[in-house]
Amino acid sequence: MDFVQASEFFRNLAPDERVFLLVRHGERNHITPADPDYGAHVGLTERGREQALALGKAIPADGDIVFFSSPVGRCMETAKYIGMGREGCASSEPQVEALGCLGDFFVQDKDSFEKVLKEGFYEGICAWLINEASGGPRHGDEAFYPLSDRAEEMLSMMLEKGNARFNIFATHDAWVVPCLTHFCHMRFTPQRWMNYLTGMAVVTDAQKRVFRIVPVTGLETGWLEF
């Protein structure tokens, strides 16, 4: 399974279908291992804001829309600019509800997770996912919740929170990658990671019965090669 262009995905959406979009923030400024808050203060680049505006333009104007976000600034910014792009008016800022869970949804132990960040973010996430896929004992995975249960909880949370036709959840790659791994059976490595403005679209009917889950990207490709 590969990523579908957001413009194509929304163009083929049926009028009676709802979307719950879990998406990574737009392009951010650089984060270094020496950052004392692990990049919490780092915002979007100008290109990142343009990316979010472009994704917003792909969302049909027919239907209400709501926005949820990790409290981290670049995610809040992303949600805001997606809304501004859809409205087609840069002076109209949508309401964005900050959800603390979107900041650290899969984190079970914060001290252990900070150790993962210091020792190698991509390597730590991938090692956790590989271990989960193997079905072996979870030795060394104190930082994270069990993947399957927590990913299902993420989906349930999104369906419970969103009551519009379009429900946007802006978060971090660390929490989109596990969901794509669980629901779409995608595989990521430290050398082949997910791109900005890329994520997972859950399509339901008006009663929130899930029809399909689609990997989508607002950029030319959903992959980053390192």
Image (tube, rainbow, N blue to C red):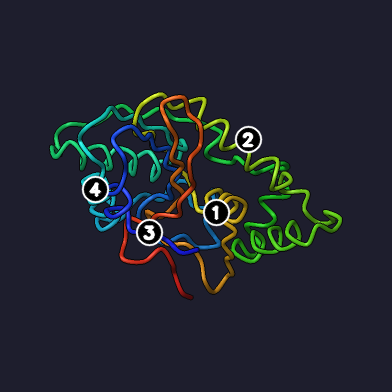
Residue name at image x 63 percent, y 39 percent: 152
Task: Tell whether 49 sits left or right of 200.
Answer: left
Residue 94's place in the image compared with 191, above or below, is: above
Check disc 3 and give the amino acid type. Answer: Val
Q: Earlier in the sequence, mark 2 or mark 3?
A: 3
Amino acid bearing label 4: Ala
- First-in-chain label (3 vs 1): 3
- Spatial CA distance of label 4 from label 3 is 13 Å
Q: Badge 3 is on which residue?
A: 4
Q: Which residue is mark 4?
A: 58
**Position in image of residue 149 (x %, y %):** 70, 40
Q: Which residue is tagged 1? A: 180
Query: Badge 4, how many Cα within 10 Å: few under 14, some, many 20+?
Result: some
Mark 3, secondary structure of its residue: strand
Across and down, in percent, residue 122 comes to 59, 64
The residue at 45%/55% (across/down) is: 215
Seen in the picture, residue 214 relative to 165 is either above or below; the reply is: below
Q: CA distance from mark 1 to mark 4?
A: 21 Å
Q: Amino acid at mark 2?
A: Glu
Q: Tell me how far mark 3 sits from mark 1, CA to CA.
A: 13 Å
